[in-house]
Image: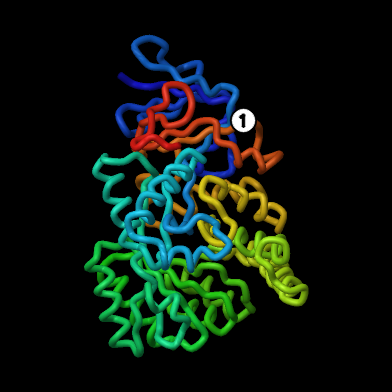
Amino acid sequence: MSTIILCGTLFTGTGKELQKNMAIEVEGNKIVRVLPAAEAPKEGVQVIDLSDKFVTPGLIDMHTHVVMDGQVDPFNDMLYTSHGKSTIDGIFRAQRDLLAGFTTIRDCGGCRTGDALAIRDAINSGLLDGPRMLVSGPYLVTSGVTTLYQDGGLTFDGPDEARKMARKAVASGVDQLKHLGILHVTYDEMAALGEVARETGKLYSIHATDLLTVKKAAKAAPDTIEHGNEIDDEALELMIRNNVCLIPTYCPYYFSAEHAEDVLGRSPEMAAATRARYEGHASHLPWLIKSGLTIGFGADTGATLTKHGAQAFEMELMSRNGMEHIDILLAATSVNAKVLRMSDQIGSIEAGKLADIAAFDGDPIQDIRVMQSCAFVMKDGVVYTGAGAKTLSPALV
């Protein structure tokens, strides 16, 4: 039996147009067609009435860590948490993301990434309910960085060792390679990781915050640069030329700035530096948008004070920093899907795509904060929030 979803306002993700009084026909896990509500079949179908909602494609968060959940020191907690507890906690965190409307998430690595792989595989097999997950392996990182990253990562020195570690990550079953770019990493090492990613068909992501590392990363042409706190004209030109998408991840920087003293316990001087770092990062956004750089959506969910299920606050920060609301919605849907090479499956509401659909009360074009409270979510044709919702397995408590 087909399901007819009646939509008050429909954002399909195919462009900036909004459509009123439309219907989506779903059969199994696929969208069959999109049509005016007045033309939708009324007999022999199940009807889901979202005629008072703003309906979107299932959202995509490009930067999460299911083995962390916004602790004051999430990396330390991640490193010293048992694999068993990390996996169990990660299941519920991923489910919170799903209930927030995020039907697809990209897990960007850590020290317990085997746990994220296990969660992904359990969801894919139907053993667990959760979002679609694309998972990185352990951080790929050069030696000489903090013990925290080396203990949980795959460490290398030189391009040959970089290739070896990248192939080791690929063999473990990852969907993408995540390089933790630190100042002294060389371009040749970054490029070697990229070679393996291209050879094996994996996504390639580089964590880069300082200007020198951002420039080397942009030259290495990964699919995404994470954070990109410092960017100049040269770095921007390289990113655009090499079709690199920026995932700015404002949330942990904003929360660290807001709570530098009262929660993080930093000195007044350190707190001021933390605020200045966020403000500098945020101030670049209008310039980056004007340049035509591809900007995706990802909150660094799980990082410092950034909770799973609450990552839509990143949209509010993107709005404050100068991005139009319709472009924020595009970033979290069709733009991200294209970067993930999954535009044929997700990111828009079109015939033949997977039935990933979310709905919200209110109009996010007027007030983007609407996106922080999901009223309905369907993934692969299964309803998880709203009327007729499936009970999550295991039950979320």
Colouring mode (rainbow / by chain / secondary structure / one colour) = rainbow
Q: Secondary structure at mark 1?
A: loop
Camera-side residue: 18 or 2? 2
Location of residue 219 with respect to 23 vertically, above or below:
below
Relative placement, left or right, of 277 versus 216 is: right
Question: Disc count in the image?
Answer: 1
> Amino acid under label 1?
Asp
Q: Residues within 10 Å of mark 1 (few under 14, many from 20)?
A: some
Residue 169: image location, x then y, percent: 28, 70
Q: Which residue is mark 1?
A: 361
Q: Residue 244 at what x, y percent from top left?
A: 48, 68
Measured as percent of width and height from the top left, residue 360 is found at: 58, 33
In this view, 233 is above or below 281? below
The residue at the point 42 percent across, 22 percent down is 388
Image quarter hosting the N terminus: top left
In the picture, measured across the screen, residue 129 lies left or right of residue 279, that is left
Q: Tell me what residue is drawn at x 66 percent, y 59 percent.
A: 255
Q: 37 and 26: which one is in front?
A: 26
Query: Hey, which quadrant is residue 269 in on the image?
Result: bottom right
Report the residue at 61% width, 41% height from top. 372
Can you give x and y, in whole percent of width and height, for residue 324 in the image? 67, 50
Q: Which of the 4 image quadrants contains residue 112?
A: bottom left
